[in-house]
Image (tube, helix red, strand yellow):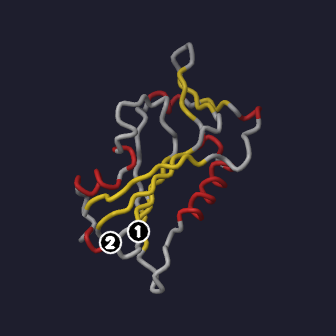
Amino acid sequence: MRCVSRKSITVFPATPTPEEKRTFFLSAVDHTVRPRHIPVVLFYAALENGEEVLPLQELQNSMSKLVTEFYPLAGRLRRKQNGKLELVCNDKGAELVEAVIEGDLSDFGNFQPNKRYTDLLDPLTSQKQIGKSVFDLPVFYAQRDLERNRSSSLW
């Protein structure tokens, strides 16, 4: 199993965030816990008629609506002069990564964690993100992987 192609799309909110909601102050807990990526993987078997399970345009439109309603997801972290972090709701967007995988759902076997699959599918390991500051990265990522048999996984 290998990644044949990968492309990244920035998904912006359908409408701008109101000015009065542009800054989201983080709690004391947010300041004591190291920022981290929490991966969630959803697998979708191929449809019997051969159609894509998660059409890219439909997923992109849904994400645009999501980051409109949950506007902090389209923002970026920023460190204030006093050293505290805040989330700037600046509509810079979320990242949607589309990967085409040479393989299919059955290649995952029993779905036990495996570094080979994590490196293949995890959007934060893409070359585009390596070396970037956490302040430059989107808060929300999604990656759609399209497998050989038209099944999909969504990270």
**Mark 1: secondary structure:** strand
Q: Outermost residue, top direction?
A: 81
Percent coordinates x, y for residue 93 in the rendering: 59, 42
Residue 56 position (above or below residue 125): below
Q: Are marks 1 and 2 in contact (CB under 8 Å)?
A: yes
**Mark 2: secondary structure:** helix
Residue 24 position (above or below residue 73): above
* Image quadrant in which the N terminus is located: bottom left
Label 1 is placed on what type of residue? Phe
Front of the two marks 1 and 2: 2
Between 39 and 52, the one nearer to me in the picture:
52
Q: Is residue 85 left or right of residue 61?
A: left
Residue drawn at (28%, 66%), measured in percent from left and top?
111
Residues at marks 1 and 2, CA–CA distance in whole angstroms: 8 Å
Q: Which mark is residue 43?
A: 1
Q: Label 2: few (<14), some or many (≥20) within 10 Å?
A: many
Q: Is residue 77 left or right of residue 116?
A: right
Label 2 is placed on what type of residue? Leu
Among the 4 quarters of the image, the one containing residue 80: top right
* Image quadrant in which the C terminus is located: bottom left
Residue drawn at (48%, 28%), measured in percent from left and top?
31
Q: Is residue 51 left or right of residue 86?
A: left
**Residue annotated with mark 2:** 105
Residue drawn at (43%, 35%), measured in percent from left and top?
35
Among the 4 quarters of the image, the one containing residue 130: top left
Between 21 and 148, the one nearer to me in the picture:
148
